[in-house]
């Protein structure tokens, strides 16, 4: 008898569209018991993992809800195989499904293809749906501007319109309407404050009717991150801040970033020691920065002081110059 395969749900969506926030909430829900979550990142440092409050980047963490979480910079194939064999050897508890959070710049088509085309993966896993997050404020503009965002939407089996708490219901309705015109067959859910009305709806996506579109979009070889970086002039810079900073320094840094690079910024995230060495989570999407909040969960360890800046046409030198307000003043 053929072995049953484990369903894999891809969670994609452009930089800052709310994937990690949504997932952080979902993994605590009983609907996510028996789920293994894999976080795959753009950038050299596994920050999303830390922002979700997990302890160890290399290991699989079991949450109270029964959900398993791990971060990986390996290929999806390698990670899925490793999970499969660890489960087989009894090193991991059984899991009934997998959720993969892709990086915000990833073209999901090669990932989708690998689930179908890689024989060793396809023996044990199957694609069960692609969920694409679209930011209600920036989403439509991003779709027009970035091919990756358009591709992420094109392959969606379920669209989640995020941050609807930030707009009036009528304005959110208008965005939902525009998305429905683009993808009339794809269901759309709304998330507010990073939450869905029903967490189990996340698993309701059905991929079959999008397969032709995926085949048409997928390049022959899996697209490397570099391809995106070169094509759009987008680069990810990992900056380090070694000493605690004051609120005044933080404010000066944000002002400088907004003024000098606001139109080129895509995403800023990190964990900064602010005001007496308290680790604070820093988030920016485009030119907007959220108020930093104290970091929750396991100590950030060496990620404390790491800021990832993803921007267009911003080289390392200029990025470093923009970090100056966070550097200790010269004696
Ligand atoms: N008001 C509001 N803010 C949200 C919501 N979801 C996410 N955010 C904020 O949007 C910013 C980006 O959210 P993330 O969850 O990190 O986005 P992401 O898609 O994982 O981003 P990348 O890791 O860059 O791909 C953060 O400041 C979040 O607090 C929401 O539903 N409402």
Image (cartoon, rainbow, N blue to C red):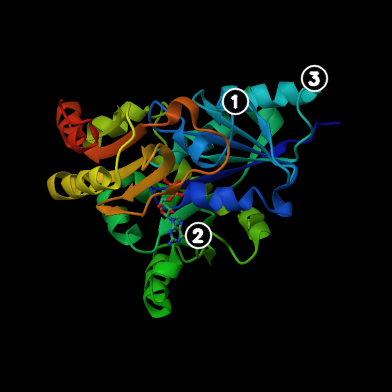
Label located before the other in sequence (1 or 2): 1
The residue lying at 40 percent from left, 72 percent from top is 172
Q: Which residue is mark 2?
A: 160
Residue 221 x %, y %: 41, 26
The label shown at residue 79 is 1
Lateral position of residue 329 relative to residue 92, left or right = left
* Alpha-carbon span between mark 3 and mark 1: 15 Å
Residue 175 seen from this side = yes
Tell me whether the residue at label 1 lies in contact with that at label 2, contact meaning CB atoms closer than 8 angstroms: no
Q: Quadrant of the N terminus?
A: top right
| Residue 22 - label | none
The crowding category of the residue bearing disc 3, from other C-alpha atoms within 10 Å (few below 14, some 14 to 19, many at least 20), is few
Say few, some or many: other residues with alpha carbon within 10 Å of mark 2 (under 14 / 14 to 19 / 20 or more): many
Mark 1 lies on a secondary structure that is helix
- Residue annotated with mark 3: 89
Q: What residue is rendered at 15% in x and 27% in y?
A: 330
On screen, residue 231 versus residue 104, left or right, reads: left
* 246 up-or-down from 320: above or below: below
Q: For this rendering, which residue is in front, 210 or 49?
A: 49
Of all residues shown, which one is farthest toward the bottom? 170
Above or below for 133 versus 257: below
Earlier sequence position, callout 3 versus callout 1:
1
Q: Residue at x 45, y 52 (%)?
A: 18
Q: Position of residue 139 (x, y in %)?
A: 35, 58
Report if the CB atoms under discs 2 and 3 are less than 8 Å apart. Answer: no
Residue 270 visible in the shown view? no
Q: CA distance from mark 1 to mark 2?
A: 26 Å
Q: Nearer the viewer, residue 291 or 184?
A: 291
> Earlier along the polypeptide chain: callout 2 or callout 3?
3
Q: Is residue 294 above or below residue 4?
A: below
**Which residue is depicted at the point 55% across and 27% down?**
57
Disc 1 residue lies near ligand 1 with CB under 8 A = no
């Amino acid at each position: 008898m053929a072995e049953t395969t484990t369903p894999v749900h891809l969670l994609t969506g452009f930089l800052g569209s709310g994937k990690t926030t949504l997932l952080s909430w979902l993994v605590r829900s009983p609907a996510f018991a028996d789920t293994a979550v894999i976080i795959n990142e753009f950038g050299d440092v596994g920050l999303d993992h830390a922002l979700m409050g997990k302890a160890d980047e290399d290991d699989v963490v079991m949450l109270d809800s029964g959900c398993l979480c791990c971060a990986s910079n390996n290929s999806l194939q390698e990670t899925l195989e490793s999970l499969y064999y660890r489960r087989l050897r009894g090193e991991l508890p059984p899991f009934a499904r997998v959720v993969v959070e892709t990086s915000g710049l990833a073209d999901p088509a090669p990932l989708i293809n690998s689930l179908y085309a890689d024989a060793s993966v396809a023996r044990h896993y199957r694609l069960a749906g692609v969920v694409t997050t679209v930011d209600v404020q920036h989403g439509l503009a991003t779709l027009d501007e970035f091919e990756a965002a358009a591709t992420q939407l094109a392959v969606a089996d379920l669209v989640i319109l995020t941050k609807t708490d930030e707009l009036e219901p009528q304005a959110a309705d208008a965005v939902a309407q525009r998305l429905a015109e683009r993808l009339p067959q794809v269901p759309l859910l709304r998330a507010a404050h990073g939450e869905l009305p029903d967490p189990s709806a996340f698993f309701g996506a059905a991929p079959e009717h999008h397969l032709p579109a995926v085949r048409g979009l997928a390049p022959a070889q899996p697209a490397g991150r570099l391809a995106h970086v070169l094509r759009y002039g987008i680069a990810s810079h990992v900056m380090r801040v070694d000493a605690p900073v004051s609120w005044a320094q933080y404010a000066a840094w944000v002002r400088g970033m907004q003024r000098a690079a606001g139109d080129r910024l895509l995403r800023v995230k990190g964990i900064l020691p602010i005001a007496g060495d308290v680790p604070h989570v820093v988030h920016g999407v485009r030119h907007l920065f959220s108020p930093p909040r104290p970091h929750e969960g396991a100590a950030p360890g060496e990620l404390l002081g790491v800021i990832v800046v993803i921007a267009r046409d911003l080289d390392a030198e200029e990025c470093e110059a923009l970090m100056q307000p966070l550097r200790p003043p010269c004696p």
